[in-house]
Amino acid sequence: MNEEKSKIGDFELENLTKDELIAEYRKLSAYATGIEEREKKQLMEIAKLKNIILMNYANSKESDGNSQISDNDQSCSSQTKSCLVDPTINAVIIQLKKDLEETRKKKEELEVELNSTKFTPESQLTKRLMYKCRKLLTENEELGKIISSGNVAQLEHDLAYHKQLLNETCENEQNLNSFLMEIDSQMDAMQATILQLKEKLDQKDLIDTNNKNDCMET
């Protein structure tokens, strides 16, 4: 859904009725809410991307380490250092390792629970537990394939893309805040003008009343 910020000129704003001003305010509130929801969605996508990349990287690293501990020690160390040059990537990888470890613990807990509980193969609980285990294994395999076939450049590209989206969201929010401040300022000016007109009207009424009284006395 695309929200467009409406722009109102000084002349148009001064001629808006109270109901029209309220309608414009509601539009701005809806626009701000849309920006906030879109930003939350983007943050969730970034978090999901980070988890996938880190888990896959850790899985790939562990697999390589088990198969070529002595032969590839030095090359793996060099590759790891090059991957961790960027502090952002380093932080993502650390978080992915942590998430991967938590996933493995959950998987082990499910397997222990399944083995220690006497369920029939046809029970619903057994089927649900087996489904969870298969799902976790499938996800780990898919993540491993993504990590092994991917590269750091793709990670940097995805992070840069999401960072750009966040910057655009922040810029739109700043523009909205500036526009709201401008409306507040114009509303204050309108209220001051209304007060001045009211004072002039009161003075005119007073003068008319005095003139009327003078005529009656004459």
Image (cartoon, helix red, strand yellow):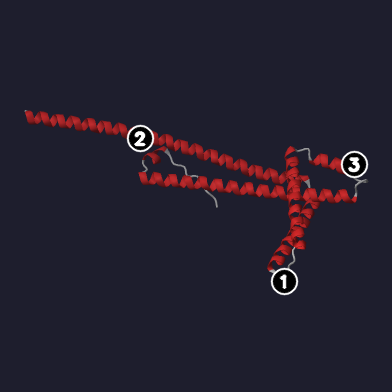
> Of label 1 and label 3, which has the lower sequence position?
3
User: Disc 3 versus disc 2: distance between alpha carbons?
Assistant: 74 Å
Give left or right: position of 130 versus 80.
left
Q: Which residue is mark 1?
A: 122
The location of residue 122, given as percent across then percent down, is 72, 71
Q: Which residue is mark 3?
A: 74
Q: Residues within 10 Å of mark 2 (few under 14, many from 20)?
A: few
Q: Which mark is residue 191?
A: 2
User: Disc 1 versus disc 3: distance between alpha carbons?
Assistant: 51 Å
Above or below for 101 versus 86: below
Inspect this view and state whether residue 85 appears: yes
In the image, farthest residue toward the right: 71
Which quadrant would residue 79 be assigned to in this image? top right
* Residue at x-position 78% and y-position 37%: 85
Q: Which mark is residue 107?
A: none
Which quadrant would residue 183 be assigned to in this image? top left
Query: Foreground residue, 80 or 216?
Result: 80
Q: Secondary structure at mark 2?
A: helix
The location of residue 12, given as percent across then percent down, is 39, 41
Query: Foreground residue, 112 or 187?
Result: 112
Going by the numbered disc 2, the residue's amino acid type is Gln
Give left or right: position of 44 versus 36.
right
Q: Secondary structure at mark 1?
A: loop
User: Disc 1 versus disc 2: distance between alpha carbons?
Assistant: 75 Å
User: Closer to the camera: disc 1 or disc 2?
Assistant: 1
Going by the numbered disc 1, the residue's amino acid type is Glu
Inspect this view and state whether residue 154 appears: no
Query: Foreground residue, 110 or 148?
Result: 110
Going by the numbered disc 3, the residue's amino acid type is Gln
* Residue at x-position 86% and y-position 50%: 64
